[in-house]
Amino acid sequence: MLAIYFGLTYFAGDIGRRILYPIRLFVTFLHEFGHALGAVLTGGWVEEVQINQDGSGWTRTANGNRPITIMGGYLGSALFGNLLFFIGARIRKLVKPMMIILIISMLVTAIYWFNSFFTSAVLLGFCLVLGLIMSKTNFGADVLMFLGLASVVYIIQDFNVGPRSDLKAYEEVMVILPAQAWMYIWLGVAVLLMYWNLRLLFRSSSESV
């Protein structure tokens, strides 16, 4: 899966970028949903979520814990990506429930937190594709693994660009460190999550042999 992802990223040119474009939008969804979930879990609410055609996005929230809401985007997407990969790789009985949770999350974002027709169309399209994969094929686990792995690798690759606005906002509320320091802290957490996930996967694999 890593070979496919990096092959498409670095050797397939424009064709590779087009193939991976839906993955980029999916990673943006995870990022923005992380912001939204951070706000909701800390007593706030979400007004709207936007996914842009260039792969960027934003989420407008009210109340809630602002530091948690802000870092929920980058770290939340890292956590979600690792969870998807682990479930796809090791807990096959949770593949369909996880896909259902993904579909519900996208439906809530597309309809209840509506902002634009592009955002809703993208998310509803993902819902349709995931629903067909879940109900008509046996590739659910492979899809979760690829989505999870690609999401984690993408945010690690893009750490210096993707969370720039989040880091600037985080620096304003957490003034003890500059944005550059928080950037490397967030990156370190994302890498550690992936490392622990892989260790757990290999340990589970060796114990089952």
Image (spheres, rainbow, N blue to C red):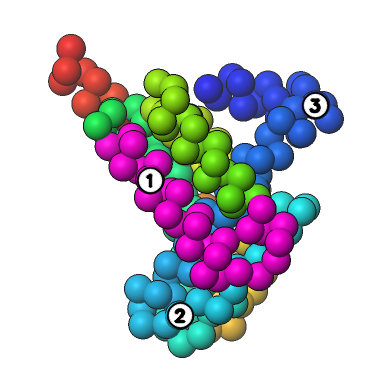
The label on residue 19 is: none
Give the vertical position of 199 relative to 62 (above or below): above
At numbered mark 2, what does the secondary structure look like: helix, strand or loop?
A: strand
At numbered mark 1, what does the secondary structure look like: helix, strand or loop?
A: helix
Q: CA distance from mark 2 to mark 3?
A: 39 Å
Q: Nearer the viewer, mark 1 or mark 3?
A: 1
Q: Residue at x 47, y 30 (%)?
A: 133
Q: Earlier in the sequence, mark 2 or mark 1?
A: 2
Q: Tell me the kind of residue under disc 2.
A: Trp
Magenta stretch containing residue 95, yes or no? yes
Q: CA distance from mark 2 to mark 1?
A: 23 Å
| Residue 154 screen position, x and y as percent | 60, 42
The residue tagged 1 is: 100
Predominant SS along the magenta part: helix
The residue tagged 3 is: 15
Q: CA distance from mark 1 to mark 3?
A: 30 Å
The residue tagged 2 is: 45
Q: Nearer the viewer, mark 2 or mark 1?
A: 1
